[in-house]
Amino acid sequence: LQLETYLRRSIEKNEIFLHYQPQVEIDTGRLIGVEALVRWNHPQLGLVPPFRFIPLAEDTGFINQLGQWVLQEACRQMVRWQQAGLDVPKIAVNLSVRQFERGTIVDVVGAILRETGLAPHRLQLEVTESLIMNTGDALAYINGLHAIGVSLAIDDFGTGYSSLAYLKQMPVQTLKIDRSFIKDISTDVNDEAIAIAIIQLGKSMNLSVIAEGVETDEQAAFLLRHGCNRAQGYLYGRPVPSDELLQRWQS
Ligand code: G
Ligand code: G
Ligand code: MN
Ligand code: NA
């Protein structure tokens, strides 16, 4: 497969880069973090969307190299922003199940933090429910990551299978309400009920809750009314290159 051949060489050819999407406190508009989102710009194919190359990278095992590059670049960028005078409280990085299967994730993250000098509490790793449920030693790795001081978020929360009893044992700090529940939040009673339930669950388990895919003021107002004061979505900013994030958010 040609795409696979190209993908293998994408890092060394400097075709891989990151975009950053702001996460904000709804009532104040304050920047509380960013999510790093990987991009692939191929000279002939143009910008290849992640849904086309992440699954391929997972199937071929290239995801480990890619994921490590992403972690390293995200941590380096945090340090660069700090040096440029922009205080980004934390950076969220997506992890794939294959990065967990190898069993080296705690060492990899620890080494990157030491190398870049980023304070561990400024790094948040995003995992999905299926990653947790499908990895035999997920709890051990999550405990290990917690022990080195990084925080964990459950991405796309509510779309996968997860045992709440299992969740309760894990040192996870954040639930991200999947954007499919946010989309029709003010018109669909089921989505509304699910969003409210996740916010309540977060409260009762002492987890912070952030809504994804917030595009309108109505959605933001709904979330605030129901006790969720954190959001990410086009209303606050699309994923952008690091210099654009700096320009937009430096005071
Ligand atoms: O903007 P967006 O199209 O970037 O992201 C599409 C999907 O790709 C999302 O589900 C996101 O979680 C995933 N994704 C983006 N960046 C990364 C990454 O660095 N690693 C992994 N494993 N997934 C990512
Ligand atoms: O990791 P995750 O699946 O959550 O990746 C976030 C994805 O959601 C990325 O593809 C990003 O570009 C996309 N996204 C972020 N904000 C919005 C939004 O407000 N609306 C829509 N439709 N997509 C969004
Ligand atoms: Mn994510
Ligand atoms: Na998500």
Image (cartoon, grey):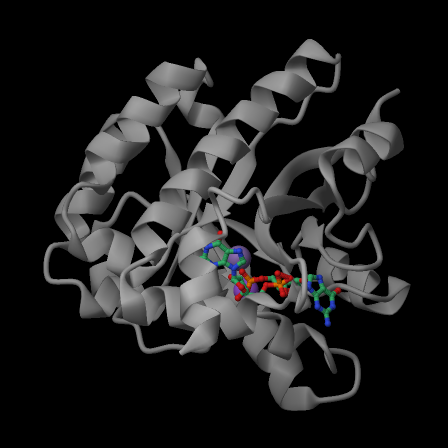
Task: From the viewer's side, name the closer residue of 61 and 121.
Answer: 61
The quarter of the picture where residue 55 lies is bottom left
Give residue 193's position: percent from left, percent from top.
Answer: 60, 80
Give the quadrant of ligand 2: bottom right
Q: Residue at x 61, y 55 (%)?
A: 39
The quarter of the picture where residue 91 lies is top right
Q: Is residue 155 visible?
A: no
Give residue 237's position: percent from left, percent from top.
Answer: 81, 51
Q: Is residue 84 left or right of residue 201?
A: right
Task: From the viewer's side, name the closer residue of 74 and 121.
Answer: 74
Specify the quadrant that holds the C terminus. top right
Specify the quadrant that holds the N terminus. bottom left
Looking at the image, residue 240 lies above or below residue 155:
above
Q: Is residue 30 left or right of residue 2?
A: right
Q: Is residue 85 visible?
A: yes
Q: Residue at x 17, y 41 (%)?
A: 104
Task: From the viewer's side, name the closer residue of 190 and 89.
Answer: 89
Give residue 43's position: percent from left, percent from top.
Answer: 67, 58
Give residue 89's position: percent from left, percent from top.
Answer: 61, 27
Task: From the viewer's side, name the closer residue of 146 and 168.
Answer: 146
Q: Residue at x 20, y 40 (%)?
A: 143
Q: Is residue 195 left or right of residue 151?
A: right
